[in-house]
Image (cartoon, rainbow, N blue to C red):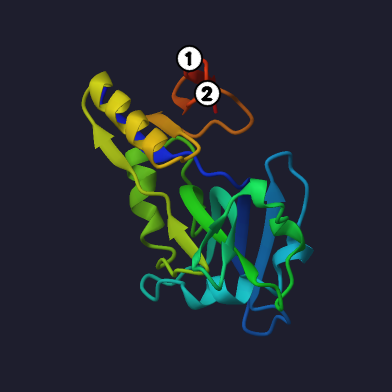
Amino acid sequence: PPFILETKWDGERFQVHYERGSASACEAHKFKYFSRNGFDYTSSFTEILSPRLVEQFVDEPPVTSFILDGEMMAWNKDSRSFTLKGGNVDVKTLNPDSRHCPLFVIFDIVYYNGKLLLNKPLNERAEYLRQVLSPEESTCQFSEQTLVQDKASVTDALNDTIDKLEEGLVVKAVDSVYQPGKRTTDWLKIKPEIGRASCRERV
């Protein structure tokens, strides 16, 4: 301890890459979307999400580039709530006329305005997120982070997660650096399992 606690989101892990083009370029805003396994799904989100993300950019300082890590969730525009993966909605195949739209839940940033942030501790990287985007209900939001000082608080948070029928928790070391492609003990998933003890996995 201390630990940072976050909700374990029931969506699809994605990285969003952005670079601002020059004034004369055909594309003023260049986005790329990559799955956890490195597959390029840019065509799935170029029209349906990229323009909405640009609208949420923070004005000062100007955003020129970033790489964000997070979870792509399906947002039900009618009920104004998430539809979990069990709802059989593929967030990668949505279209503008669908009752759902993709919402990117952001929990980390590894690159910002030409600066690599991999070796900065988690609590410092979190500060950069507020310099990139402003949350908007149907477009993007930050994964809420709660600082706790002991293991008992983790247990209490897990019990609360179970009561809310949520997916679980992610417990992160405050000073953890970002290690792409590696599973470490700095980030741990804690998932309630019906009829069994809680399952702890490295993220």
The residue that appears at 73% across and 58% down in the rendered structure is: 92
- Residue picked out by circle 1: 197
SS assignment at label 2: loop
Q: Please tell me the numbered disc located at residue 58.
A: none
Quadrant of the snapshot with the C terminus: top right
> Residue shown at 70%/80% (left/top)?
25
> 202 and 184: which one is in front?
202
In this rendering, is residue 3 above or below 55? above
Task: Describe residue 17's horizontal placement relative to residue 96 as left or right.
Answer: left
From this viewpoint, is residue 31 visible?
Answer: yes
Q: Is residue 36 left or right of residue 73?
A: right
The residue singled out by tag 2 in the image is 193
Residue 18 against residue 173 in the figure, above or below: below
Amino acid type, callout 1: Ala
Question: Where does residue 146 sit, x and y in percent of width and height?
Answer: 29, 40
The secondary element bearing badge 1 is classed as loop
Q: Residue at x 36, y 30 (%)?
A: 158
> Could you tell whether 48 is left or right of 173 in the image?
right
Residue type, label 2: Glu
Q: Position of residue 134 (x, y in %)?
A: 40, 68
x, y percent for residue 15 = 62, 50
Q: Is residue 174 visible?
A: no
* Front one among 143 and 90: 90
Which quadrant holds the N terminus? top left
Distance of label 2 from label 1 (alpha carbons): 6 Å
Q: Residues within 10 Å of mark 2 (few under 14, many from 20)?
A: few
> Pointers 2 and 1 in contact (CB under 8 A)?
yes
Few, some or many residues within 10 Å of mark 1 (<14, 14–19, 20+) = few
- Most foreground residue, 197 or 32: 197
Q: Quadrant of residue 76?
A: bottom right
Residue nearest the observer in this picture, 200 or 60: 200
Q: Residue at x 43, y 72 (%)?
A: 62
